[in-house]
């Protein structure tokens, strides 16, 4: 049996892992919510890791409010930077492999070709900086880690763009969505499936990996596809980012190259449009 700790278990990704975990009989999961295990509490982390014999820790805990992080950087960094350091230190001591989730927001978005794992992060937002600090803490303190950078995470769980669109689609006759930010939507359940595969393969191919669904889209394209799949009729207008100002700067292009993850784990990654069909269906069943 492989023992796995999931931190931040009540969030979107934690919930996605829970939703498929029952089918993975060889893994025993311990789910900890933020109130059960606060990753900013170094002593609690050490005590927890010393009490259990985890083979893996999947860190789904994060400060994810991108705009609020501009004003509350210390809070974001306490979780995404320092909290991750405490996890990495505990993993080192207990020989636990860390699977940590990071973000496309570590990149500035100035590229016009997909970002590879060899590109140097240059975060343009406080959230992106806090997540990059977490990555740096891991590589400083640990060797047995997987950092999985993902992008535009959505699902039937938690708060995300798909769920916001479905809600607004019921309330509004017209909606404007930005068309000048390009990225790759990622169905959280697909990411959860990959993480479980990674654990089952139990390799030592440690390092940084980029994982999103295949294909690229603008937020406008993504919104249009969501309304089509959910059969919602709404007047949708493409607008520029400048017409919808928000506190945090977003990368205008954050497509990530997935060649490394596909080659290393012999992966077939679903196209975002196919996964969206599954997500909309599953959302309707909740
Ligand atoms: N969402 C996206 O579009 C996106 C894109 C790229 C990368 N990512 C990354 O993917 C990962 C998963 O994201 P998500 O969408 O699942 O986020 P989420 O739904 O916001 O979940 C984050 C979880 O972390 C918990 N948490 C916050 N502070 C904590 C602390 N101090 N100790 C323990 N748990 C704490 C939260 O609990 P409470 O609710 O109780 O505070 C929440 O359950 C994150 O690392 C995120 O940075 C997300």
Image (cartoon, grey):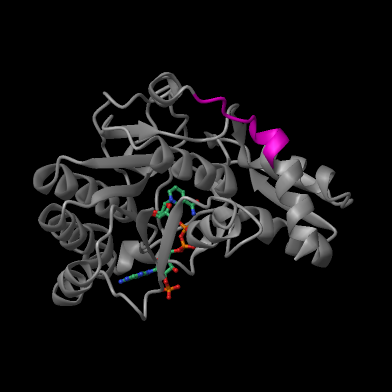
Q: Nearer the viewer, residue 101 or 67?
A: 101
Q: Give the magenta-colored segment's residue range.
A: 267-275
> How many circles with numbers are drawn on the protein?
0
Asked if residue 78 is positioned above or below residue 98 in the image, the reply reads below
Asked if residue 105 is positioned above or below residue 65 in the image, the reply reads above
Q: Name the image quarter holding residue 178.
A: top right
Picture coordinates of residue 145, whole percent (x, y): 24, 42
Q: Nearer the viewer, residue 205 or 40?
A: 205
Q: Name the image quarter holding residue 147.
A: top left
Q: Is residue 23 visible?
A: yes
The residue sitting at 78% across, 46% down in the picture is: 236
Q: Specify the quarter for ligand 1.
A: bottom left
The residue sitting at 53% across, 43% down in the picture is: 193
Does residue 48 appear to the left or right of 63 in the view shown?
left
Q: Can residue 65 be seen in this view?
A: no
Does residue 109 appear to the left or right of 189 in the view shown?
left
Picture coordinates of residue 125, whole percent (x, y): 33, 50
Does residue 179 appear to the left or right of 149 in the view shown?
right
In reply to whether residue 272 is colored magenta, the answer given is: yes
Picture coordinates of residue 130, whole percent (x, y): 26, 54
Q: Quadrant of the C terminus?
A: bottom right
The residue sitting at 53% across, 50% down in the picture is: 24
Asked if residue 148 is positioned above or below residue 10 in the image, the reply reads above
Q: Name the image quarter holding residue 106.
A: top left
């Amino acid at each position: 049996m492989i023992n796995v700790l999931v931190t931040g278990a009540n969030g979107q990704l934690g919930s996605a892992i829970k939703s498929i975990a029952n089918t993975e009989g060889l893994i025993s999961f311990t789910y900890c919510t933020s109130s059960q295990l606060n990753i900013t509490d170094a002593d609690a982390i050490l005590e927890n890791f010393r009490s259990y014999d985890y083979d893996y820790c999947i860190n789904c805990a994060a400060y994810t409010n991108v705009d609020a992080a501009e004003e509350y950087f210390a809070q974001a960094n306490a979780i995404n930077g320092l909290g991750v350091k405490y996890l990495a230190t505990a993993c080192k001591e207990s020989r636990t492999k860390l699977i940590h989730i990071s973000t496309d927001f570590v990149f500035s978005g100035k590229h016009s070709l997909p970002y590879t794992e060899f590109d140097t992060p240059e975060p343009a937002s406080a959230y992106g900086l806090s997540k990059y600090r977490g990555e740096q803490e891991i590589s400083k303190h640990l060797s047995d880690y997987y950092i999985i950078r993902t992008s535009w995470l959505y699902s039937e769980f938690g708060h995300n763009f798909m769920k916001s669109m479905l809600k607004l689609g019921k309330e509004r006759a017209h909606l404007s969505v930005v068309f000048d930010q390009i990225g790759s939507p990622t169905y959280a359940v697909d990411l959860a499936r990959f993480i479980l595969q990674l654990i089952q393969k139990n390799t030592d191919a440690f390092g940084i990996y980029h994982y999103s669904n295949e294909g690229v889209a603008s937020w406008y394209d993504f919104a249009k596809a969501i309304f089509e799949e959910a059969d919602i009729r709404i007047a949708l207008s493409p607008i520029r980012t400048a017409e919808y100002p928000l506190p945090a700067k977003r990368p205008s292009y954050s497509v990530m190259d997935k060649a490394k993850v596909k080659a290393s784990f012999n992966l077939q990654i679903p196209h975002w449009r196919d996964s969206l069909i599954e997500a909309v269906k599953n959302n309707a069943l909740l």
